Image (cartoon, rainbow, N blue to C red):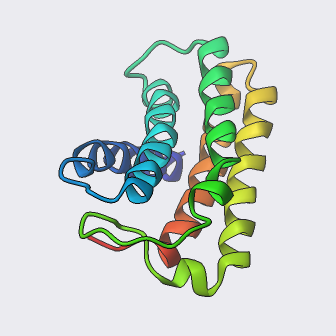
Amino acid sequence: MKKTFQIAGLMLIVAATAALAHTGVKDPTVKAWMIGMGEIGDNTKVLGSMAKGEAVFDAEAARKAAGAIAEHAGQISVLFKEQAADPKSEALPVIWQTYSDFLVKADALEMAASAAASSIQAEGDLRPALAAIGGTCKACHQTYRLKK
């Protein structure tokens, strides 16, 4: 359970950082990446708030947030198809050097979020679903995101 709260906390920080990061981005491709990843972060924040008890558990809202994560994760291959550069970008060039692995990780997020969208029925379902989603985010960020 402690690990779930740590992952939820990490995802809240990621979401907050992403919101501030859009300021001053000039490259439209990079801005699209940030918006897409920001949507994933925002919806993860919804789940994290419920898991931490900051928001009342709402199964429908949780499923909707997980579904939105899955939808945006499904767009990662399109968003990141072209390499671009902007000083505000946190995407590392290794994405395009090992693009197939990057896509495997994006698919894992989509699958975890899709599973959560169909399985969250009760409050007890939320933490394992969030842990699965957070684990896929962490796996990708460790390799493909600039560490700040």
Res. 101 image quadrant: bottom right
Closest to the observer: 78 or 54? 78
Residue 62 falls left or right of residue 74: left
Residue at 71% from the left image edge and 67% from the top image edge: 103
Q: Name the residue rendered at 80%, 28% in the picture.
A: 119
Residue 54, percent from left and from top: 37, 22
Q: Residue 70: percent from the left, percent from the top?
A: 69, 40
Task: Check the image and report above or below for 71 versus 105.
Answer: above
Q: Nearer the viewer, residue 34 or 7?
A: 34
Most extreme residue toward the left is: 24
User: The N terminus is located in which quarter?
Assistant: top right
Q: Nearer the viewer, residue 126 or 137?
A: 137
Residue at 40% across / 59% down in the picture? 30
Number of marks in picture: 0
Q: Quadrant of the C terminus?
A: bottom left
Residue 51 location (% of width, % of height): 50, 30
